[in-house]
Image (cartoon, rainbow, N blue to C red):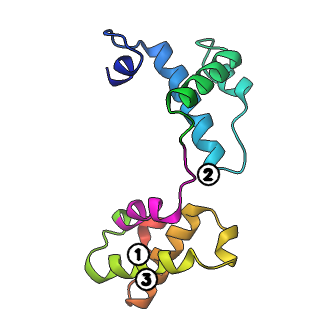
Amino acid sequence: QYIAQLQGQSQVIGPRRLHLLAASVLVIASKFEDEAVPCFEALAKSSAGEFTKEEVHVVELHLLEKLGYRLHVPMAVHHLPWFLELVEASGNLVLLAQYLCEVGLESRELAQWLPTDHAAAAVVLASMMMSKPEWPPAFE
C-alpha cells in the first residue's frame, strides 16, 4: 500500500509488479555494496517471464527519479547494528564496537574494505578486547 501511495494509486500492487520492484531495488542496492551488479537478463530469466530486462531498467530509473537521485554510499556504521544484534551485544561491547568503527573510518587501509567487512571487524575486535569469543558463533 505504501508503494501504491508513492505512485498516487489507491490500489495495492500485484505480485508481478512487486517482483519487478524487488528486482530493481536489488540492482540499485547492489551498485552500492556488491562488487558485481546482477545481470538484468538473468533477473528477467529468473522471473519466469513476469518481467523483461528492459522493464527492470525502466523501474530502476523511475525509482531513482522518485528518490531525486538522493542516495548515499552506506558506511560501516550503517551496518554495525546488524552485527551487534547478531552477537546480542550490550553495554561496553556496543560502545567499543562503535568507537572502533569510527576510528576505522580514518584509516587508509580500511578504505579498501567493504562497509559490511569493516563493521564485522569492529564487532570481532571489540569482542576480542572484551575477552569474548574471538569469532562470535553467530558469524558462522
Element on which disc 3 rests? helix
Quick check: 105 left or right of 5? Answer: right
Q: Is residue 82 magenta?
A: yes
Mark 2: give few (<14), some (14-19) or many (20+) Cα within 10 Å.
some
- The tag on residue 123 is none
**41 left or right, relative to 3:** right
Q: Is residue 36 above or below residue 48?
A: below
Look at the picture and state if 93 lies above or below 18: below
Amino acid, disc 3: Ala
For the residue labelled by badge 1, is the local secondary structure a helix, a strand or a loop? helix
Q: Is residue 134 above or below residue 82?
A: below
Q: Position of residue 113 (x, y in %)?
A: 65, 67
- Front position in the image: 16 or 69: 69
Amino acid at circle 2: Glu
Amino acid carrying label 1: it is: Gln
Name the main secondary structure of what is drawn in magenta: helix
> Which residue is found at the position 63% from the left and 11% from the top?
49
Name the secondary structure under disc 2: helix
Q: Which residue is mark 3?
A: 126
CB-based contact (under 8 Å), mark 1 and mark 3: no
Q: Nearer the viewer, residue 62 or 50?
A: 62
What residue appears at the point 37 percent right and 13 percent down from the top-left corner? 8
**Quarter of the image containing the N terminus?**
top left
- Where does the magenta region start and end? 71-84
Query: Which badge, 1 or 3, comes first in the chain's sequence?
Result: 1
- Percent across and percent down for residue 7 are 42, 16
Mark 3 surroundings within 10 Å by alpha-carbon count, few (fewer than 14), some (14 through 19), many (20 or more): many
Q: Quadrant of residue 25?
A: top right
Q: CA distance from mark 2 to mark 1?
A: 20 Å
Residue 111 x, y percent position in the rendering: 66, 70
Residue with the mark numbered 1: 98
The disc at residue 33 is 2
